[in-house]
Structures are given as C-alpha cells and as structure tokens.
C-alpha cells in the first residue's frame, strides 16, 4: 500500500510541476508580447518624429532659398505637408529689433521666421530661421 501512495504522490508532484511550468510559460509569453507591442509603438513614434523633423527641415531650406524681399519673409503662410495630408505647416515671420548690440550700432534688425509642423494628434514641432 505504501508503494501505491508513493506512485500517487509522484504523479501529483509531476502534475504540480507541469502546471507551474505552464503558468511560467504563459507569463513569459505575455511579457514578451507586451514588450513587442511597446517596442512597436516606440518605433512608430520615432518614425513620426523623424518625419516631422524632415518636413520642418524642408520648410527651413525653402525659406533659406528665398530672397530677403520674398513675400514668404513678410507675411505668414501655411499648407499641408507633402506625404502627410493631415499634417499642417505654418511659417510665421516677425521683425525683431535687438537693442542689446555692442558693435557701435544703436540697434540690429532682422527677421525671424518660425516654422511649425502640427499633427492631428496635437504634436507640434517648431523650428526657427533668421534673415538679416
């Protein structure tokens, strides 16, 4: 009779070990899949940030290529980002007079233009360019 109890207890231990192994395996798979989802979101967010930077750089280069008397440097403008029709860009120029000049001039005047890229989810990227 003792031999039958030991067989039963061994079978019970094997069953408990198998169940514990199954629980650990399912927890491991859940952790791996949640990590993969988080990595995918992070990668998507990083790609979108790079795209916004690229779009802002394109607008900055466009501004730099315009002559100082261009209407782009005098009045605000805007539009949609090529490749991203739901993103908007705006260029807002403003005349700045710097009074803290120590070169012998009473003031220094220049135009500062702000390039803003806005996405539908509310993310905003602002870059500036100057024109003397």
Image (cartoon, rainbow, N blue to C red):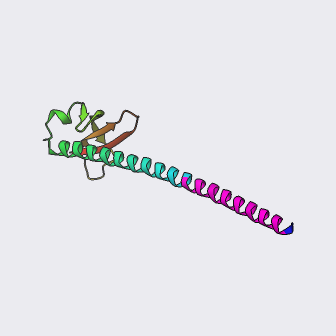
> Residue 93 sits in which quadrant?
top left
- Quarter of the image where the C terminus is located: top left
Question: How many numbered markers are drawn?
Answer: 0
x then y, percent, for residue 62: 18, 43
Residue visible at 40% across and 50% down? 43
> Residue 75 sits in which quadrant?
top left
Measured along the vertical axis of the image, is residue 118 above or below residue 26?
above
x then y, percent, for residue 103: 26, 53
Residue visible at 60% across and 54% down? 27
Verify whether residue 81 appears in magenta.
no
x then y, percent, for residue 74: 20, 33
In the rendered image, is residue 127 in sight?
yes
Measured along the vertical axis of the image, is residue 80 above or below residue 6?
above
Is 47 on the left-hand or right-hand side of 65?
Answer: right
x then y, percent, for residue 120: 37, 32
Is 18 on the left-hand or right-hand side of 89?
Answer: right
The extreme bottom residue here reads 3
Front-most of 32 and 63?
A: 32
In the rendered image, is residue 107 in sight?
no
Residue visible at 38% across and 47% down? 44
Front-most of 111 and 76?
A: 76
Front-most of 129 and 53?
A: 53
- Over which residues does the magenta segment extend? 3-29
- Quarter of the image where the N terminus is located: bottom right
């Amino acid at each position: 009779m003792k031999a039958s109890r030991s067989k039963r207890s061994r079978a019970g231990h094997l069953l408990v070990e198998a169940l514990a192994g199954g629980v650990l395996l399912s927890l491991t798979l859940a952790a791996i899949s949640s990590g993969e989802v988080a990595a995918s979101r992070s990668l998507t967010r990083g790609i979108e940030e790079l795209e916004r930077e690229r779009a802002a750089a394109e607008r900055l280069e466009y501004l730099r290529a315009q002559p100082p008397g261009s209407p782009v440097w005098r009045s605000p403008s805007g539009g949609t980002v090529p490749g991203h029709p739901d993103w908007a860009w705006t260029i807002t120029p403003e005349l700045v007079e710097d009074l803290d000049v120590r070169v012998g001039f009473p003031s220094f005047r220049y135009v500062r233009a702000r390039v803003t890229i806005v996405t539908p989810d509310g993310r905003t990227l602002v870059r500036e360019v100057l024109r003397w």
